Amino acid sequence: MGDIKNLLERLSNAHGVSGYENNIRKIIEDEIWPFVDKIRTDKMGNLLATKNGGSPELMLAAHMDEIGLMVKYVDEKGFIYFTTTGGWFDQTLLNQRMILHTVNGPIYGVIGSKPPHAMKKEETKKPVKAEDMFIDIGATSKENAEKSGVFPGTPITSDMEFKSLCNDFVTGKALDDRGGCVVLIEAMKRIKDTKATIHAVFTVQEEVGLKGGRTSAFGLDPDVALVSEVTFTGDHPGIEKKDSALEIGKGPVITVSDAEGRGIIVSEPVLKWLKNAAVNIPYQLKVGSGGQTDASIIHLTREGIPTGVISIPSRYIHTPVNVLNMNDLENSVKLIVRAVEKVDQFF
């Protein structure tokens, strides 16, 4: 499991906010190239790696992008205001250290706020909105910040490093969906016994509207698709089991539906295929009320593409401190490999 963990660490520590996935794409391309017959990058920026075969054609997808920020405005004193890219809970941003990816290279800054010593009592009870936060890079003026390469449109990501926790748990930024990317890479390395054509697609801009999933699925028009993701659990304080009964360590998650059916309701044949593939592999079933994946748009592409989702259970998604268990990741790999090798059962 060491090699998989090392790859996860490399991808977690790399930076690739939505629309700026080049760094991630390069790591994945170098890693997967020896195990596929063809690699290309489409007009949208999706990376498509293909194992040649016959019928059916199977699309496996995982998104490369992570949530982040973008410079909106630099004031006269050199403080930087920003917009959010992807779904943030504003309070997780406050007092973080960030990296601004400028044309001159990375610049570090901190998200500052008014200190509690200067706040009135009623102010301390109000959450700070992202629109009222700012980044301090140590600039002395707007001109000084611009000389450092900071302009509107500069992408920003969290400065957080991957770490091991106890009991095969790990934490890091962007495990949504670098965890899914690792599962897909490792699955492509292990898939042997199949006559199908397999397209592993590493998509862009999922966090801002499932964009890469839409265009890549339209271009490939596969017979069936399977998305590799992460999903949130209900096994920690602050969330009730009725909101999520999923637990870390209990195996990969097969989606039945998400976003109360507004995202995807997985078809019965797809569910049967994935459950049959999961013999001797622990798994959990998800009926979700919120959150969508590339599957939501892939299954609506062209005349419709039968699509399933296999996810790694994860805590604290959409924060810089995602947590998952490496055993769940390994079992997700096994389940996708088994599903691909049994894809003929679907037809």
Image: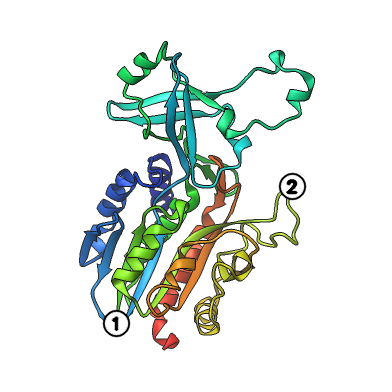
Is 94 left, or right, of 119 in this rendering?
Answer: left
Is 72 left, or right, of 37 in this rendering?
Answer: right
For discs 1 and 2, the disc positioned in front in the rendered view: 2
Residue 333 at least partly seen: no
Q: Dividing the picture into quarters, in which one does residue 219 lie? A: bottom left
Residue at the disc numbered 1: 195
Q: Nearer the viewer, residue 39 or 267?
A: 267
Looking at the picture, does residue 12 appear above or below residue 100?
Answer: below
Q: Amino acid at mark 1?
A: Lys
Residue drawn at x 37%, y 35% is 153
Residue at the disc numbered 2: 238
Looking at the picture, does residue 188 appear above or below residue 143?
Answer: below
Q: Residues within 10 Å of mark 1 (few under 14, many from 20)?
A: some
Is 265 left, or right, of 69 in this rendering?
Answer: right
Q: Nearer the viewer, residue 168 or 211?
A: 211
Q: Dividing the picture into quarters, in which one does residue 49 lie? A: bottom left
Label 2 residue SS: loop
Residue drawn at x 60%, y 44% is 166
Looking at the picture, does residue 100 appear above or below residue 141?
Answer: below
Task: Using the image, tell me which numbered label, if any, was put on residue 70.
Answer: none
Residue 118 screen position, x and y as percent: 69, 13
Residue 202 screen position, x and y as percent: 35, 58
* Render colour scheme: rainbow
Label 1 residue SS: loop
Residue 128 at least partly seen: yes
Residue 237 screen position, x and y as percent: 74, 47
Residue drawn at x 54%, y 29% is 96
Looking at the picture, does residue 310 appear above or below residue 230?
Answer: below
Which tag, 1 or 2, sits closer to the chain's start?
A: 1
